[in-house]
Amino acid sequence: MPGLTGQAFRVGGRVCSALLRAAMALLLVVGLGLAALSWRLAEGPMHVPFLTRAVEQMIARGGLQRNVEVSDIVLAWDGFRGGVASPLAVRVSGLRVRDETGALRQELPDLSVSFSLARLLVGNISLTEVTLRDPAIVLERDQDGDVSLAMGHLDDGADADPASGKLLEELLDGSGLFSALRSIVITNGRLTILDRQLHLTWQMQGVGLTLRRVGRDGAEGEGVAQLVLPGGGGTVPVRLTGKASNKGPRVEGRLEVPALEPARLAGLMPALAPLGLVNASVSMDVHGLLDGGERGSPQLTLGLRVGEGNLALRPGVRVPFKGMELHASGSPEDLRLERLALTLPPVLGQPQSVPPVINATGQAALRQGRWRGDLALALNRMEVSALGAYWPADLAANARHWVVENVTAGVANGGNFKLAAESAEDLSGFRLTEAAGTLQVEQATVHWLRPVPPVENVTGTVRLGLKEVLVQANSGRQAGTALNASGVTVRLFALDTDAEQMEITGRLRGPVADAVNLIRHPRLKLFEKRPLDLKQPGGQLDATLRLATPLLVDLPADAIRVSVQAHLTALRLADVVAGQDLQRGTADLTVDNGRLRATGDAQVGGIPAKLSVEMDFRPGPANQVVERVQASGRTDIASLERFGLDLEGLAAGPVSVEAVMEKPRSGETRVDLRGDLQDATMTLTPLAWRKPPGQPATARAELRAMGENLRSLRNLRVEAPQLSLRGGGSFTQDNRLQQLDLEDVALGRSRFGGSLRAPASKGGAWMISLRGPVLDLMPALTTEKPAQLAAAPQARPDPDPPADIVVEGRFDRVLLDQNRFLTGVQGQIRADGSGTLRQGRVSGRVQNNAPFDVAVTPRGAGRDLHLTSEDAGALLAAFDVLHQVRGGRLSVNAHWANNRPDAVLSGTAELQDFSVLDAPAVGKLLQALTVYGVFDAVQGPGLAFSHLNAPFSLSPQRLTVRDAHAFSPSLGVTVKGEMNRVARSLAFDGTIVPAYALNTVLGRLPLVGRLFSPEKGGGLFAAAFKVTGPVDNPNVSVNPLSMLTPGFLRGLFGSGQPAAP
């Protein structure tokens, strides 16, 4: 329909003016012929053709013959009733009004107008009643809110009547043309309102309306109608009530719809557009207020009662409800939601004792062609398991999927939410611009990463936003564990993008064992490539867990990002190294997808230590270090025996130890070991070397392993005063030391190398091989060891005795003193675990000259000893046994009856062609006998002997000689007795025979020889003597009478006074 302006009311004004003029003329005629007309009108309505023609002529003179047409005019009067004159009525039929284009604008097929007869008689034309039957009326409300008859555009040259458009003001004017008007009645009418302010077209049919004047300038009325819905949507029955006042003017009305479908009303006006979101049976009550004085938009109040249905949050997204009540107010451009109560239906199969109810308030405004509004929501209570039934599937779909799938139990209450949205005027392009809210949850179960067990009994708050959902749990417990969770935050963010994300942060407290099982869960894949092998973990943990993933239904493992920061106390681990446990540990741990780091203090095998562990899970080259463990501590060396390192007899006292293990991605694991032995005592008893505390000493080594198997020992270094050792070693498949290689050993003046090989099997022997240019035995030979000579208690049999030791050596030179040494020494010996020599052979030369050979061979239950030397004097002097013997061939044959450490060695020593010089005991003896020639020989070139035979028994405590005898052409000696090796004292007695060759002739005679020489090796003239006292300065006593006494009487005389020293 063409646009209309305020001038459209001119046609209606002119029509009314013509009708009024006609009525006035008619009334004048009536006044002149009142008497005649009274009788006629009393008989019934009277057609007045000339009046019809007169009205037509007046319309024509006004130039409106093309716009207005009238079919017939009828007069009617009911006379006087009850002493009161009835109003005079004019009934006009077939009144039509057209606009300049010829389009029919207004059609009044039956119009009745009643006039006040009393006023008419005095010349005043006053309407009292207007009745419209079957009218078709078109009204127009302009941009300023004025209401007029819609007449389209008239000629621009027509005079404008400034008052012609104010129909409502004229009808309510108490002093105007319609001041006597008491009522307007419309029956079965059709009403069209062109609302230019709201850009709407209202259509109603079957209109039955009654308006009554109230007071001087007011009116009220009621009626019914059928509201025609746009788009062929049918009609809706409505009930109308209202009132108006000329002060403004002000119009107030109410529209009641008992039953309708809200979506059918949504297209009537923008203010009702939100009704299109509701799909349910609705009863509606609309109250409107129009104040023409303020020239503003009409104010509306809307009340809805809605049955079961659903609410469209956006196209394709609907939330079901059981019922709803709504109260709203505002203008067509500004709406206020004062109350919304939305009762949600129970979820099928999950009945709830208290149905969820959502209460809401909000507002919306139409500005610059776009709706913008916000909504505040409150939720009373809801079972968390039912959330998926109410959360639309495509609203933040991934966030919804995570929440529905992983929050599986609990109760939500105290929810408060705020939504903001905008759309075009017709609600197209609807979008949420803000979504925020909070929700309290109790006794909830949250699966933070399936199939990891969930957190149970969660109490906390859920904060909802358009771009982010935040779950904050105050407390909870990790299912299946004693781990308590607090401060847990689940953050779902980037929900407005296609890359929705999730972050989980929480604090866990509880047993270390439960925490280890949790972080070792295969779903986290932290230790998939590098297993975390912890045995019997114990202690307490206080940790912060962080987990981040994209919100995907099918979540790939490499998309999970995990971070754990933990503080461990009272930590316990079994069998961390060499079967030893870790106890009383305190550590700080950090682990994520790329690394693990842990530092702390603990006792390992009872030794306090500082520990550091690093693991690298990132991909890298083959030589990348993927695991590094560092341990350092200070302990007593005896404690190291728990780790399989028995240094008894080698070191004692405190030691500082540091171990660093590095494991590459491929290849051998490296373990660096360092020890600070400054405060320790170090000893090598066989070589009489000792480092006292306070002197610097260090030891270091490097272990190499492949997997769990030790491969080698490298870069072994020991540094101490007068000690430098370099070496390495290898291990068996069961990680036992197989061989220790001594590459370079410098000990005092000793220089050698060699190897130590562990027993290959049970019952085997340690194999020690030593070779070098120099072996210095001087410290060992010059160190007094009286304790070793003391009688040892009988040891109980060891059910698991130590392994035997086999030592094989070859040295160019063996130093015995500053000027004494052996050369070309080589041999092999075997000792059992108690240190007893069981078998062996050693040979060499004394100072590059006289060879010697010593052999020990098993025989029966014991062992035989065989010793030979081509220069007995040199051998005895080299070992600092006797320095008074020169030359001689030595042969010793002896036997140990058993293999105990205290076994006695019994045998015979034979020495031939030797000489003795400067022997204190022999010199004193000969001096006492005044054998001066022989004495001078001892003091000079030496006393020569042809042969010595000495049966003996040797134990750790004493040396016993039985009937030993030695002789030369000038002297013979017999000796028996013992030397106390512990006290280093002598107790010998014997005889000495001068002129031995001649003196023993009678003793060799048959039968009577024993009469002259009773002792073996004795003679006719022999002296008895005794040697007692210290080895270094013995006492010698001789019986002088026994020298002149025949052999068979010599025993009758005792010894004499001791010889002078």
Image (cartoon, helix red, strand yellow):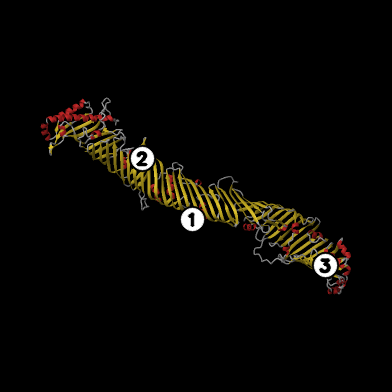
When asked about the image quadrant of residue 580, the answer is bottom right
What is the distance, in whole Å, between disc 3 and disc 1 at their CAs?
A: 90 Å
- Neighbours of disc 2 within 10 Å: few (<14), some (14-19), many (20+): many
When asked about the image quadrant of residue 878, the answer is bottom right
Callout in the foreground (1, 2): 2
Give the mark, 2 or 3, whose residue is nearer the N terminus. 2
What is the distance, in whole Å, between disc 2 and disc 3 at their CAs?
A: 136 Å
- Neighbours of disc 3 within 10 Å: few (<14), some (14-19), many (20+): many
Question: Residue at position x 13%, y 39% from top?
Answer: 82
What is the distance, in whole Å, between disc 1 and disc 2 at their CAs?
A: 52 Å
Residue 57: image location, x then y, percent: 18, 26
- Neighbours of disc 1 within 10 Å: few (<14), some (14-19), many (20+): some
Where disc 2 sits, the SS reads strand
Marks 3 and 1 in Cβ contact (< 8 Å): no
Left or right, 40 with reference to 100 = left
Which residue is labeled 2 in the image?
Answer: 364
Which residue is labeled 3 in the image?
Answer: 1036
Residue 753: image location, x then y, percent: 71, 53
Q: Amino acid at mark 3?
A: Val
Left or right, 429 with reference to 1055 = left
Residue 873: image location, x then y, percent: 82, 60
Q: Amino acid at mark 2?
A: Ala
Up the image or down, 40 lies above or below 818; here it is above
Residue 923: image location, x then y, percent: 85, 64
Name the foreground residue: 318 vs 491.
Answer: 491
- Residue 6 appears in the rendering: yes
- Residue 1006 appears in the rendering: no
- Quarter of the image where the C terminus is located: bottom right
Which residue is labeled 1 in the image?
Answer: 482
Give the mark, 3 or 1, whose residue is nearer the N terminus. 1
Up the image or down, 551 lies above or below 767; here it is above
